Image (spheres, rainbow, N blue to C red):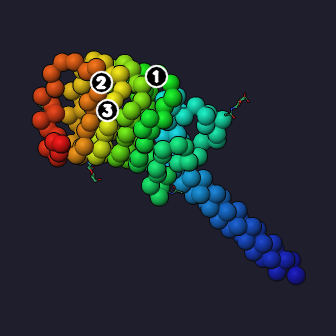
Amino acid sequence: MAPSVSISILIVALWVLYILMHSTTMVIAAGSGAASNSSALELEAKALLESGWWADYSNDTFLNHCKFDGIKCNAGGSVIEIDRVGTLYYRDAISKLPPSFGTLSKLSHLDLSRNSLTGKLPPSFGNLTRLVKFDISANSITGSIPKELGNLTNLTHFSAQGNRLVGELPLSLANLTRLQIE
Ligand SMILES: *[C@@H]1O[C@H](CO)[C@@H](O)[C@H](O)[C@H]1NC(C)=O
Ligand SMILES: *[C@@H]1O[C@H](CO)[C@@H](O)[C@H](O)[C@H]1NC(C)=O
Ligand SMILES: *[C@@H]1O[C@H](CO)[C@@H](O)[C@H](O)[C@H]1NC(C)=O
Ligand SMILES: *[C@@H]1O[C@H](CO)[C@@H](O)[C@H](O)[C@H]1NC(C)=O
Ligand SMILES: *[C@@H]1O[C@H](CO)[C@@H](O)[C@H](O)[C@H]1NC(C)=O
Ligand SMILES: *[C@@H]1O[C@H](CO)[C@@H](O)[C@H](O)[C@H]1NC(C)=O
């Protein structure tokens, strides 16, 4: 009698322990997976919001950034295209672009043409190494082209005419071997 009761208790205890361990493992796995994904995506959303170019969305909860105007994401939720041609309705400084823009590591198309952007091009654009198309034409951007743009070795289209840029083209741009001269 007594031994069989304690064996039953032992079995129940082991079963409860198994369920607890199993569900804890599941929760930890799901939690860390979601956290690692969403933290990278949250940084991308934060970078977009910090630019001030999507002020209308500042009340949105994070991870909605793929629905922002002119934004295209890949299947994983990373921003791959930004198209804000003539849609930034106010004079704004391109140089206030937050350093966090460099976290848009999948960005391949960035078109900011035909706006009223002022100020200097920040060197942090050199972090967007996936860029294939980069268009800042027809703005009021001043200063010179930062040498860091020589890091954008995948660039095939770069357009900066119609600005108030001065100075010589940096030598580093010679590294942009895929650039098509139009
Ligand atoms: C965002 O929230 C603030 C304060 O709650 C509100 O005043 C503002 O109108 C909201 N903006 C938008 C675009 O919903
Ligand atoms: C999470 O990240 C993995 C690997 O980076 C990716 O394959 C997956 O699509 C992502 N899931 C979501 C919901 O973004
Ligand atoms: C961007 O590049 C600068 C140097 O140009 C570097 O200091 C910074 O850490 C980079 N930022 C990101 C987010 O990669
Ligand atoms: C250039 O693009 C390819 C394909 O998207 C990518 O694998 C590679 O890392 C890019 N180069 C740089 C310097 O980011
Ligand atoms: C970007 O370019 C600058 C100047 O051309 C260089 O000093 C720097 O090491 C480069 N950064 C990366 C991440 O390639
Ligand atoms: C071109 O790239 C190479 C390798 O990344 C680097 O060593 C060199 O300094 C670059 N040239 C210029 C002019 O920036």
Residue in the picture at 70% in, 62% down: 20
Between discs 1 and 3, the one toward the N terminus: 1
Q: Nearer the viewer, mark 1 or mark 2?
A: 2
Q: Do the CB atoms of the residues marked 2 and 3 lie less than 8 Å apart? A: yes
Residue in the picture at 44% in, 55% down: 74
Q: Residue 22: name its quadrant.
A: bottom right
Q: Which quarter of the figure is the C terminus placed in? A: top left
Residue in the picture at 42% in, 21% down: 93
| Picture quarter with ligand 6 | top left
Secondary structure under badge 2?
Answer: loop
Q: Do the CB atoms of the residues marked 1 and 3 lie less than 8 Å apart? A: no
**Does residue 152 sit above or below 37 in this rendering?**
above
User: Which kind of residue does numbered mark 2 sit on?
Assistant: Asn
Q: Residue 145 location, x and y as percent?
A: 24, 25
- Name the residue that disc number 3 marks: 137
User: Which kind of residue does numbered mark 1 sit on?
Assistant: Asp
Label 2 vs label 3: CA separation?
7 Å
Q: Residue 76 location, x and y as percent?
A: 47, 55
Secondary structure under badge 1?
Answer: strand
Between discs 1 and 2, the one toward the N terminus: 1
- Name the residue that disc number 1 marks: 92
